[in-house]
Image: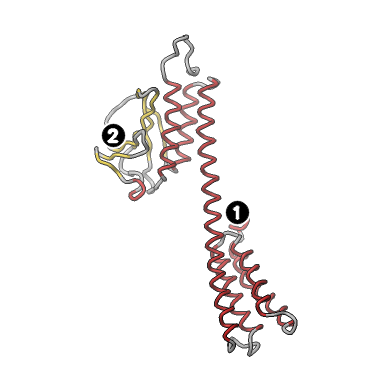
Amino acid sequence: MGPVLQAHRPLVVGAAAVVPLVACGVLSLFRDSVANTNAALGLVLLIVAAASTGIRAAGLVAALSSAAWFDFFLTEPHNQFVITDRADIETDVLLMLVGVAVTEVALWGRRQQARASRERGYLDGVLSAAATVGAGRSSTRSLIDHVCEQIVDVLQIDRCRFDPGDGPVLATLNNDATMTYNGHPFNVSRLGLPTDSEIALVTQSGGVARGRFLLTAATRVVKPTLEQLRVAVALADQVGAALAPPDLDGQPPSSTS
């Protein structure tokens, strides 16, 4: 949902209720020349427009309003909330069902779009860190800070800090994006990230540990997807590449602070 629509959510929902009323009122002036099926198709377009806002309430309200005012203005007996014709009853019911279905499909599409946007953002973060390592245009300290920011953003956690040591810690985010807690497998998708311990994310290069990031998710339970965890691991490994010993030609992979 866009920030403008979100800021005017009550107005959008109110319009979703009123516009079908106005449309049915206008169509009632042309009952003899406009078939009810055509009128219903026009109302479906209004429902689609409401659902496309990404506000579930707007789509559902538009569907209910369309069905109600279609009954009141366009079915016999007119100007009453009564329907006597079976075909009109079926049309009215279909209006509501189509409205609910269209709203859910629109919301699903927006969720998919948002997911694709997040995935693009994750990829941009990894590529940005990799480019920094490859170009050697930033100090290792700056790279670590940048990767910490990216990990916090990807996992939606509270803090991230780099630790060159390897002291004991209860929770570990492994290189394959699985997690262990106190030596046992930990289901992040079901339980969320541990909130009672820092989480160690080891940064590696060539299979050798080069330090670790310590992640804190203490203020709320977050449940990152496997994909997000993999991105965090990939980001951490960019730092591992920067901390690796110089190549055989004597050139370090990146400058140091």
Which structural element holds mark 2?
loop
Image quarter of residue 176: top left
Q: How many marks?
A: 2
Q: Say the numbered circle drawn on residue 2.
A: 1
Q: Amino acid at mark 2?
A: Val
**Counting residues from the N terminus, which is met first, the one under dot 2 or under dot 1?**
1
240 left or right of 100 in image:
left
137 left or right of 32 in image:
left
From this view, report whether residue 34 is shown above or below residue 253: below
- The percent coordinates of residue 164 (x first, y second) are 36, 24
Image quarter of residue 157: top left
Residue tagged 2: 169
Q: Amino acid at mark 1?
A: Gly
Foreground of the two, 216 or 63: 63
Q: Residue at x 50, y 33 (%)?
A: 126
Which residue sits furthest left? 183
- Color scheme of the displayed model: secondary structure
124 left or right of 38 in image:
left
